[in-house]
Image (cartoon, rainbow, N blue to C red):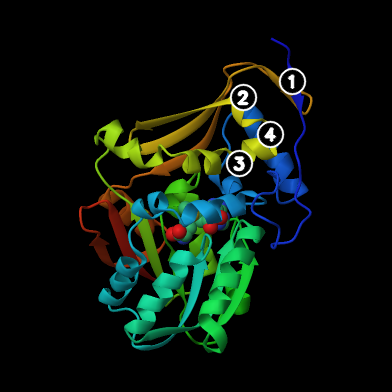
Amino acid sequence: MPVRSVSPLVDSRSNSAPRTELPRFECEQHRLTAMEAIRVGRVPLKFAYAGSAAYTHDAYARSAGYLSMLASARHEADALIAAGVVAAGALAVAEIGPGNGGRSRAFLSRLASRGRTCRRYLALDFSETLLGIACDRLTRFGGDRMSVDSHVWDIEAGTSRGVERWRPEAEPVVGCLLGHTLGNVEQPATALANITAALRPGDVLLLSVAAGPADESPQDVLAPYRSSQFRTAALQPLLAAGLTDAELEFVLSWQDGVVTGEAVLRRSVVLGDHPLPAGHRIRCFQSRRFRPSDVIGAVREAGWQVRDVVSAPGGSHLVVTASLR
Ligand SMILES: C[S@@+](CC[C@H](N)C(=O)[O-])C[C@H]1O[C@@H](n2cnc3c(N)ncnc32)[C@H](O)[C@@H]1O
């Protein structure tokens, strides 16, 4: 079988690029890091949201399959109010990983309907392209009642001064990490510590994670992931690296409370200067299910006082509210 050489693409376009564009990385730094990660066989999921992948995520995030895997935004907003840590009135919300902003809009709308209106909103994300998509949506939603700002931040790489520079003086900030994001990162404890260091004592953390027993049947757990839309979204960084869909088998598994998606090369390729053999495995998706004691322990360990833990109907999600000591 001949070996094919593949060459990656880097995005030089604006947020308004069409969704049908070729797979591209957001910038040269992303390309270099992702190419090395493909060779090593573990691509952090953050690359599946950046560059052209932001548009794939935008399309996928509007599908019923995606929404069925998350706690409802209404449930997340109600959990924050039930914890009794935000009084009625105006709120300043700093959301990490807003995705395409669709669920953020539903979340803010529910808070407003219950007397907590967000006046200042800050979106923070690894993906500058996705931030553009989310902020367009939230600016249309908020009109002149809510200011919308954004800041690029990789919560896995270190802390950020983004919240500090934006925050209203003397008012606490509600930091949100919704829709499984913590379960997607490589090291949740490190990400939580980086988030803690970006906030101040008195601030609130609203954290929504997937939960459930680690011994659930693979058939049940993996069923929502068996869609062509999910496959396309998960493979985006590999396609941006120049691999083709036909060269990749996509294999899902469920072990020790983690859903994993791996691409397996069907044939040998040369990536940059590096030959990769047929059968080379590249983990490009992961989603952890947290046990309540694990997520509560991790939040406490990061320096937070846990104020409330609410389980979604059916026990598939947990929403933790905490305040920074
Ligand atoms: C699973 S999506 C959740 C989106 C949205 N919160 C929702 O509930 O639909 C993960 C979000 O976190 C962002 N993200 C993933 N890894 C990140 C990282 N290391 N640093 C910052 N943002 C990250 C993604 O770009 C995306 O916006």
Which residue occupies 29% across, 57% down? 318
Disc 1 marks which amino acid? Arg
* Residue 324 in sight in this render: no
Residue 227 relative to residue 308: left or right: right
Which residue occupies 72% across, 42% down? 31
For disc 2, the neighbor class at 10 Å (few under 14, some 14 to 19, many from 20) is some
Q: 133 above or below 216? A: below
Mark positioned earlier in the residue sequence (4 or 1): 1
The circle on residue 247 is 2
Disc 3 marks which amino acid? Gln
Mark positioned earlier in the residue sequence (1 or 2): 1
* Residue 82 in sight in this render: yes
The answer to whether the residue labelled 1 contacts the one labelled 2, judged by CB atoms less than 8 Å apart, is yes
For disc 4, the neighbor class at 10 Å (few under 14, some 14 to 19, many from 20) is some
For disc 3, the neighbor class at 10 Å (few under 14, some 14 to 19, many from 20) is many
Residue 186 relative to residue 4: left or right: left
Which residue occupies 46% across, 81% down? 172
Disc 4 marks which amino acid? Glu
